[in-house]
Image (spheres, rainbow, N blue to C red):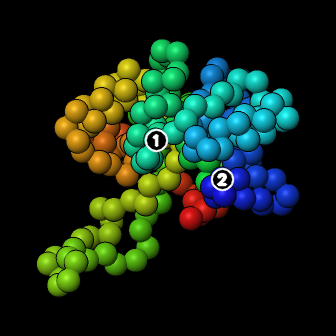
Amino acid sequence: VPKQLLLIGGKPILLHALEKVERIAEIGQVVVTCPGDYLEQIEALLRNRNLQRFRCVPGGATRQESVYLGLKALAPCDRVVVHEAVRPFVTVEEYRRLLDCPEESAFYGLPIPFTVLKGARWVEDIVPREELVNVQLPQKFPYAKLLAVHEQARAEGRAFTEDAGMYHHYTGEPVRVLPGSEYNIKIT
């Protein structure tokens, strides 16, 4: 069973995340990417909860591919918010702060409270932790630019673990880091 369908408080993790989005009228369309084998089950879950702005599409083999497929399934729009189903404790207020942020690209992040060293088998260098940030979602971007960035990464066969880093890599534009929350955990 995909972890987004596991229960917290008697409710699938996915619903905890989506019910927050449902309360934000400014978000006009929502595409949920999901494992193909669970597409009908997730669609039924959304229907049963009367989540009408939501539609499901099969996801990809990687997170990056799933985001790309979600972007392709959206009707063109000005901006897009990317979230992950396994971050169920995001708040409506966090969504609103992200949407109200004046910068066109932004995400939540936390300072890294521990030491990080560069090197796999041997220490190669010290990485100053004040230069690092633990990435959280949701994230927002201009829709057309994020889609172009995903298409460029696909054309080059490059893999990224999240969108803010990929967006900055290809556009060179700054992406605003908003103060994150210890509560907005990813269930892994």
- Marks 1 and 2, Cα distance to the nearest angstrom? 15 Å
Q: Is mark 1 on a helix, strand or loop?
A: loop
Sequence-first disc among 1 and 2: 2
Residue 185: image location, x then y, percent: 59, 61
- Crowd rating for badge 2 (residues with CA inside 10 Å; few <14, some 14–19, many 20+): many
- In the rendered image, the residue lying farthest to the top is 76
Reply above or below: 27 against 58: above
Amino acid type, label 1: Gly
Residue 103, quarter of picture: top left
Residue 131: image location, x then y, percent: 29, 62
- The residue under the point 78% across, 39% down is 45
Residue 98 is at least partly visible in this image: no
Residue 23: image location, x then y, percent: 76, 32
- The residue under the point 42% across, 33% down is 68
Q: Which residue in the protein does label 2 denote?
A: 4
Reply above or below: 6 against 160: below
Q: Quadrant of the C terminus?
A: bottom right
- Crowd rating for badge 1 (residues with CA inside 10 Å; few <14, some 14–19, many 20+): some
- The residue under the point 53% across, 54% down is 180
Residue 113 is at least partly visible in this image: yes
Q: Which residue in the protein does label 1 denote?
A: 60
Amino acid type, label 2: Gln
Left or right of 115? Residue 39 is: right
